[in-house]
Amino acid sequence: MKQLMPCLVALALGIAVGVGIGTMISKSKVAESQTKIDELQSQMEISQADAQKAIKKAMDEAAQHKKKLSRNQALISRLTAELAKMKAQKQQAIATPPADTADEEAVSRPPATVTPSVPSTEYIVKDGDSLWKIAEEQLGNGMRYKEILRLNPNISEDQALHEGTKLKIPTQEN
């Protein structure tokens, strides 16, 4: 038993030393891990702040683009209205010649009796119409556009058609 006691003391001392060394080693590893965790948290906070700045900048740019788009849409609307107004004025000017040129046009235009009496119907020009397209749709052949020209001395082959203009179209039998 006497010999057992020093062994037990030695064993207890060995255990105590082992636990102490193990604690010291694990303490340094825990401290090292905590330092890494702190560094990663710091990097994450910096990344989050950068992301927030980037999001704010993108939102500000989007708002600026939205304002520009709104201004451009308003401009397009205003220009479209002005264009429609100008088309209407041009069409009215074509329909009613100025008083000072009315006599000259009457002299240069052939008398109404020269145009042969052809049975006709009335057609109102739509947006995108052309003489060829009207002849093709109404008369069955685009080549018949010249018949439309003969019945409508107020238009010419090289003149653009305007929406709302009334044209005489020969009946299809002709």
Image (cartoon, grey):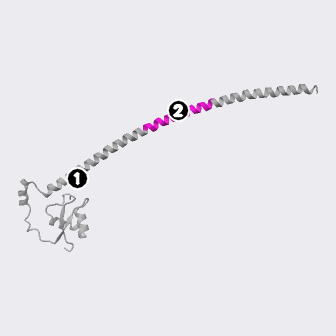
The residue closer to the viewer here, 133 or 8, is 8
User: Could you tell me which quadrant the C terminus lies in?
Assistant: bottom left
Q: Residue furthest bottom?
A: 173
Give x and y (percent) for residue 168. 17, 66
Amino acid tagged 2: Ile
- Vertical position of residue 96 compared to residue 70: above or below: below
Give x and y (percent) for residue 94. 14, 56
Q: Does the magenta stretch include residue 29?
A: no
The residue closer to the viewer here, 111 or 8, is 8
Label 2 crowd (10 A; few <14 / some 14-19 / many >=20): few
Q: Which residue is drawn at 62% across and 29% down?
A: 35
User: Could you tell me which quadrant the N terminus lies in?
Assistant: top right
- Vertical position of residue 102 compared to residue 13: above or below: below
Q: Does the magenta stretch include residue 39?
A: yes
Q: Do the residues labelled 1 and 2 touch (CB within 8 Å)?
A: no
The alpha-carbon separation of the residues under discs 1 and 2 comes to 57 Å
Label 2, on which residue?
46
Instruction: Describe residue 73's horizontal placement relative to residue 5 as left or right.
Output: left
Circle on res. 47: none
Displayed quadrant of residue 142: bottom left
Instruction: Describe residue 133's horizontal placement relative to residue 65 as left or right.
Output: left
Displayed quadrant of residue 72: top left
Give x and y (percent) for residue 22. 75, 29
* Dominant secondary-structure state across the stretch colored magenta: helix
Q: Which residue is drawn at 72% across and 28% down?
A: 25
Q: Residue at x 7, y 57 (%)?
A: 102
Q: Which residue is drawn at 76% across and 27% down?
A: 21
Label 1, on which residue?
84
- Vertical position of residue 33 compared to residue 119: above or below: above
Label 1 crowd (10 A; few <14 / some 14-19 / many >=20): few
For the record, the magenta segment spans: 35-57
Amino acid tagged 1: Ala
